[in-house]
Image (tube, grey):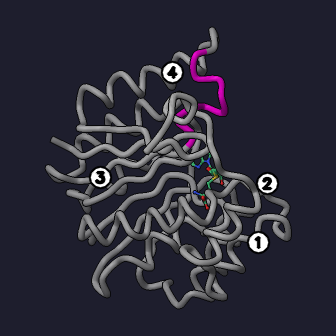
Amino acid sequence: MADIDSRAGLTYCSPAILEYVNSLHAPHDAALKWAFEAPASFGLPSIMIGPSEGKMLTLLMKLGQVGKAVEIGALAGYSALRIAQALPADGRLWTLEMNPDSIRAVREALRRAGLEDRVSIVEGVALDKLFSVERDAPFDAVFLDADKHNYWAYARWAHQVLRPGGLLLADNVYYFGNLLADTPEAAAVRRFHEETARNFDSVVIPTPDGMLLGVKR
Ligand SMILES: C[S@@+](CC[C@H](N)C(=O)[O-])C[C@H]1O[C@@H](n2cnc3c(N)ncnc32)[C@H](O)[C@@H]1O
């Protein structure tokens, strides 16, 4: 059941409700807790996804029987752990990250989770590194969580390297509330939406800043 307000975007969530449901449905093991808290100690902004979005990634990876995944934007490895925890023993995540401080944090997060063998960190500016990852295509899932104005380019790439039925996920697709703004950056994010809607069977899950889910046709 919904009502006019909730269908129009109003949320019934509150910080207390979110904390309660996260503690039950999306709890942190020791490595996840470390990765969630790590940005502050590495001088990084705390801009990782929330526990619910993280657990959603885990479950989507399982539902999609994802064996090979790519992530663009690792920060301190929180979402990478959420994805990698869902992969089979012979699965692999390639995570692209350009910030050396982040890369140090991700390495430590993977070590703590015992997932070093399942995740490859690809260091550098993502657009310059995609070619080095695509030799391992086709992939089962691609998660975008880096520079939003390049999402359209990442999604085009994802369409080429995903298998049919493969998943595209992208965080912050409301663009921090600025999606409809009259700026070149917002226009670039709208281009991402328009192209993705054409090329994928897609929906925006109404998380706080919108999480796009697309299935390659
Ligand atoms: C929002 S954070 C990622 C959060 C992470 N996905 C999580 O939820 O735990 C964005 C990350 O993307 C990285 N980034 C931004 N632009 C990038 C680019 N062009 N190439 C590679 N990494 C980039 C930033 O350094 C930052 O660590």
Q: Nearer the viewer, residue 171 or 134?
A: 171
Q: Quadrant of residue 35?
A: bottom right
Q: CA distance from mark 1 to mark 4?
A: 31 Å
Q: Position of residue 185 (x, y in %)?
A: 60, 21
Q: Secondary structure at mark 1?
A: helix
Q: Please give the residue where the numbered disc 2 appears in the rendered image.
A: 45
Q: Nearer the viewer, residue 130 or 198?
A: 198
Q: Earlier in the sequence, mark 1 or mark 4?
A: 1
Q: Earlier in the sequence, mark 3 or mark 4?
A: 3
Q: Main secondary structure of the magenta part?
A: loop
What is the magenta range? 172-180
- In the image, is 89 to the left or to the right of 36? left
Q: Which mark is residue 203?
A: none
The crowding category of the residue bearing disc 4, from other C-alpha atoms within 10 Å (few below 14, some 14 to 19, many at least 20), is some
Q: Please give the residue where the numbered disc 4 appears in the rendered image.
A: 188
Q: Contact (CB < 8 A) between labels 3 and 4? A: no
Q: Earlier in the sequence, mark 2 or mark 1?
A: 1
Q: Please give the residue where the numbered disc 3 appears in the rendered image.
A: 167
Q: Secondary structure at mark 4?
A: helix
Q: Is residue 176 magenta?
A: yes
Q: CA distance from mark 3 to mark 1?
A: 28 Å
The crowding category of the residue bearing disc 3, from other C-alpha atoms within 10 Å (few below 14, some 14 to 19, many at least 20), is many
Q: Please give the residue where the numbered disc 1 appears in the rendered image.
A: 38
Q: Earlier in the sequence, mark 3 or mark 1?
A: 1
